[in-house]
Amino acid sequence: MTEQQRSGCPINLTLEVVGDKWSLLIIRDMMFGNRRHFRELLTRSEEGISSNILADRLKTLLDRGIVSWAEDPSHKQKGIYSLTEQGIELLPVLAQMAGWGFKYLDVTEELGIRAKLLSEGGPKMWAEFMDELRETHLGIKRRRKSGPGVGERLQAAYQRVVAR
């Protein structure tokens, strides 16, 4: 146990890494919104994170190996953030949190539809979505199934609700 840790409890240690308000929202935006540039993470989040908090949380996520950073090949003055395997494996945690929130809290229909679908789809859907994230963020090719992927289905469901 290091001096900065309150205890060796795995829940405590996880909370020390991603337990602040913003870290999981950044990971959420990278997973579900495919936001991978600093500016996208800053301006396209409904919660309105400040630039200094975003920079601080991204540094922590980088230091902990949850995200990585590389130069953006399409624009030399930009960097692109990617989820690492550690970050991708947080998907079931976020899906469980979203499902709990959908069940017990007053969520909006448009922001709750993904939670509903992920909850209904369960671990099989989560595994498929994690494979999609591995392809997007890690470049690991996957065997494609016919039809739209999980990310596309979640986005389409969101768009249908917003269009009403």
Image (spheres, grey):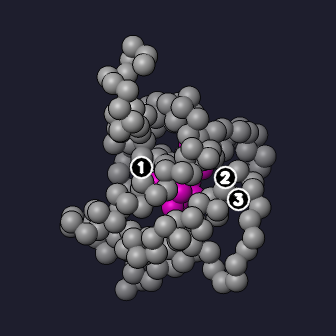
Q: Is residue 34 magenta?
A: yes
| Residue linked to disc 2 | 137
> Is there any visible trace of residue 15 in the rendered image?
no
| Residue linked to disc 1 | 25
Give the quarter of the image for residue 49.
top left
Query: Local crowd at mark 1 within 10 Å, few (<14), some, or many (≥20)?
Result: some
- Give the CA distance from mark 1 to mark 2: 17 Å
Tag 2's secondary structure?
helix
Is 86 positioned to the left or the right of 76 in the image? Answer: left
Q: Which residue is drawn at 54% across and 51% down?
A: 89
Kindly indicate whether the residue at mark 3 contacts the one at mark 2 (C-beta within 8 angstroms).
yes
Earlier sequence position, callout 3 versus callout 1:
1
Vertical position of residue 33 compared to residue 88: above or below: below
- Give the CA distance from mark 2 to mark 3: 6 Å
Q: What stretch is highlighted in magenta?
A: 28-38
| Residue linked to disc 3 | 135
Tag 1's secondary structure?
helix
Q: Is residue 69 magenta?
A: no
